[in-house]
Image (cartoon, grey):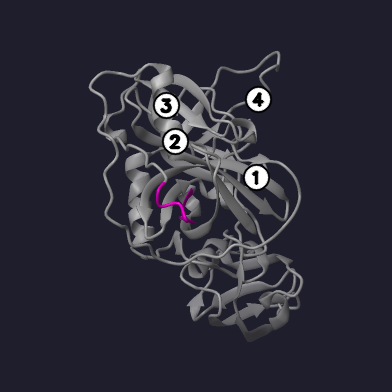
Amino acid sequence: MSAFGVRRVSAAIAVLAAVGLALLAIPLEHGTTDASAPAQVTTSVVAPPAPPPVVPLAPEQISERVVPTIVTITARTGLGMTAGTGIVLRPAESAAVVLTNHHVIDGGQEITAKSMRDGAAYPVEVLGYDSSRDLAVLRLPGGAALPTAALGSSRTARVGDPVTAIGNAEGGGVPQSAPGAVTRLGVTVLTRNSSDGSRNELAGLIEVNADVRPGDSGGPLVNAFGEVIGVSSAGNAVQRDEPSAPAPQSYAIPIDSAMEVVDQILAGRTSDSVHIGPTPQLGVGVRDHVEPQAGTPSGAQVVQVSYRSPAEGVGLARGDVIVQFGGVPIRTASDLTIRMNALHPGDLVDVSWVDAAGAQRSGSMVLTEGPPR
């Protein structure tokens, strides 16, 4: 299956990871543009979603209940296009708040959404994201009237429970349902992004045997009552006509833990893994630099420098090892990622590094705005 995966080595700043279960954002075509993101949203007072039914729904009733509450998401990146799905959580002032996977919008220089209820198109603003947990929160200006999803609780899920994944399967813009059952709970998997091959570990997932497809990324996994209990994020899908295709095996982020991230982002609280607002761009790809004798990380080694980026402007080059950034010691590539999560475009940052000849160097740069990473 294509990869819902996550984190990429990128020009904004990325860390090289390892291993992988292939997942779901579907690449479409090449092109680039730009997206920006405010930091907070204030919700308006509206009628709550319809109460859950008292008896399980038929498949067509589940579809009727869920489809109007999801949107297709398309992101144009430097590598092409990705397509995924988003869940409408709540209205905001003249807008809608939507939950999706981080890998759906990762690197997105132009991101758009369309309602699966009526096909209406909306621009997308990225409010924040947690790449390590593969979650992103979006704002759709003009989408305040979109129906909102009925949220259940992932804590009620049990092995054997019937479930249905619904989304933008294969990126065609047509909602499709994939019925199945819960097969395991609390699963940890290593995921791989189909667009760039980057990898990430996701923990505490709900495993199901529904045939989740590329493009379903970020869509809802619902119970027999049409309540969202998870966010589809990973799977093993292959071409349907593959002669030796494995049994479907897909994974969803529990909605309870996903909503903790949503609440943190809407409150504007950054953390080691959560970034709020527009993404700052440094313009390097990095990996851990390990001291040959000690065998321990001693900085973030530059493996790529983007043209006309802040990093290039300050003199960073491939092979240099960043050892301090913004007044914080850097011992690993992850240290640099964590530091970048707390920064924003326009911030002035001091950086110190060791060049390929072993000389100590330093400089100051102003971070520019880049796509979400």
Amino acid type at image mark 4: Val
Residue matched to label 3: 64
The reply to whether callout 2 and callout 3 are in contact (CB within 8 Å) is yes
**Residue at image point 51% right, 59% down:** 126
Amino acid type at image mark 3: Glu
Nearer to the camera, 279 or 14: 279
For marks 3 and 4, give the one nearer the viewer. 3
Residue matched to label 2: 68
Determine the residue located farthest toward the left in the rendered image. Answer: 54
Nearer to the camera, 143 or 315: 143
Residue matched to label 4: 238
The reply to whether callout 3 and callout 1 are in contact (CB within 8 Å) is no
Helix, strand or loop for the magenta stretch, by majority: strand
Q: Label 3 vs label 4: CA separation?
A: 28 Å
Q: Is residue 219 above or below residue 127?
A: above
**Residue at image point 59% right, 77% down:** 367
Q: Label 4 vs label 2: CA separation?
A: 28 Å
Amino acid type at image mark 1: Thr
Instruction: Name the disc covering residue 308, or none.
Output: none
Q: Quadrant of the N terminus?
A: top right
The picture places residue 265, in percent across and down from the top left corner, at: 39, 59
The reply to whether callout 4 and callout 1 are in contact (CB within 8 Å) is no
Q: Secondary structure at mark 4?
A: loop
Q: Label 1 vs label 2: CA separation?
A: 22 Å
Please indicate whether residue 176 sits to the left or right of residue 55 in the image.
Answer: right
Residue 181 seen anywhere in this rendered image of the structure: no
For marks 4 and 2, give the one nearer the viewer. 2
Determine the residue located farthest toward the top in the rendered image. Answer: 243
Please provide the residue range marked out in magenta. 135-145
